[in-house]
Image (spheres, rainbow, N blue to C red):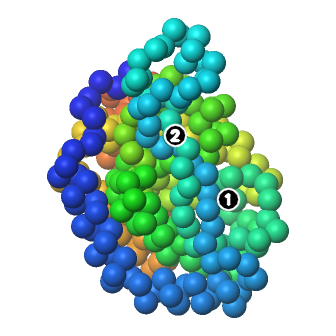
Amino acid sequence: MWAGPEVISWPKRFVDVAFASATLIVTSPLLLLAALGVRLASPGPVFYRARRVGRDRRQMKGDRRICSRGADRRRLDGYWGREFTMYKIRTMHVSATGSSITARNDSRVFSFGAVLRASKIDELPQLFNIIKGDMALVGPRPEAPDIVRSHYSAEDLTTLRVKPGLTSPGSLYYYTHFEGLLAEDAAMELYLRQLLPVKLALDRVYMKRATVLYDFRTILRTMALVALRALGRKSFSAPPELAEAERVGFLPVRHAEPGSAQSF
């Protein structure tokens, strides 16, 4: 069980709001171009509203799981989380249904949407979530409610003790090592079985070590990785958090990387 200090402090919040606000101003022309491109490429709204689970320490009234514990306090450990609406630029056809996990060459994604996803431009509206207070710049990446409720272990649920983030060590691992391997016919199974446990373990390492400086380094890593992917790089080194996750027992055994490569 994670026992580190909560990653919620006024310096972090100040940096989050200042950085998100400045980035929105700088990228506003890019957002306008992306919005225009979406409207021309696929009929429908520009933005996609995704339900995700974030941090919430309030008692959830009527939740039988909590009531069965005899809980009558105003605040609990917050492990069940709070659902919120996360904003993205739409990259799929309006008629698309199915899994919350996007596969490689997913047929639901239109061509311009694939460009937005590859460049991570579709994630920029989450800066509004940061300013609003639903998210932070860096923190465990939020998951869909069905995944949290059905597939999080007790240890995984500790990631709901802090605000979810726009980026995290776990989400960077997904971006560099798994995103291109999720075949459409088995994307959810592969995600739940191989990626999710490692992704959450890496984010628990982040929670254990979190500081404003660590957040800054993670943001720089994110920008560097996105740039390298845009330039065509396909192999990346294992994240430094992976070894620590194994050392502290978040990952009890060496995780078998997808494919045969052990150096990325």
Image coords of residue 246 (percent x, y): 38, 31
The residue at 74%/82% (across/down) is 42
Residue 136, above or below 65: below
Q: Nearer the viewer, residue 71 or 232?
A: 71
Image coords of residue 239 (percent x, y): 37, 50
Image coords of residue 56 (percent x, y): 44, 37
Amino acid bearing label 1: Thr
Regarding mark 2 in the picture, which secondary structure is present there?
strand
Q: Residues within 10 Å of mark 1 (few under 14, many from 20)?
A: some
Instruction: Quickly name the residue at label 2.
Output: 82
Assess whether mark 2 and mark 1 are in contact (beta carbons under 8 angstroms).
Answer: no
Amino acid bearing label 2: Arg
Instruction: Quickly name the residue at label 1.
Output: 102
Regarding mark 1 in the picture, which secondary structure is present there?
loop
Dot 1 or dot 2, earlier in sequence: 2
Residue 119, above or below 167: below
Could you give the CA–CA distance between mark 1 and mark 2, rounded to whole angstroms?
Answer: 23 Å
Residue 128, above or below 261: below
Image coords of residue 161 (percent x, y): 39, 34
Q: Nearer the viewer, residue 181 or 130?
A: 130
Q: Is residue 109 left or right of residue 117?
A: right
Query: Where's the C terminus, which quadrant?
Result: bottom left
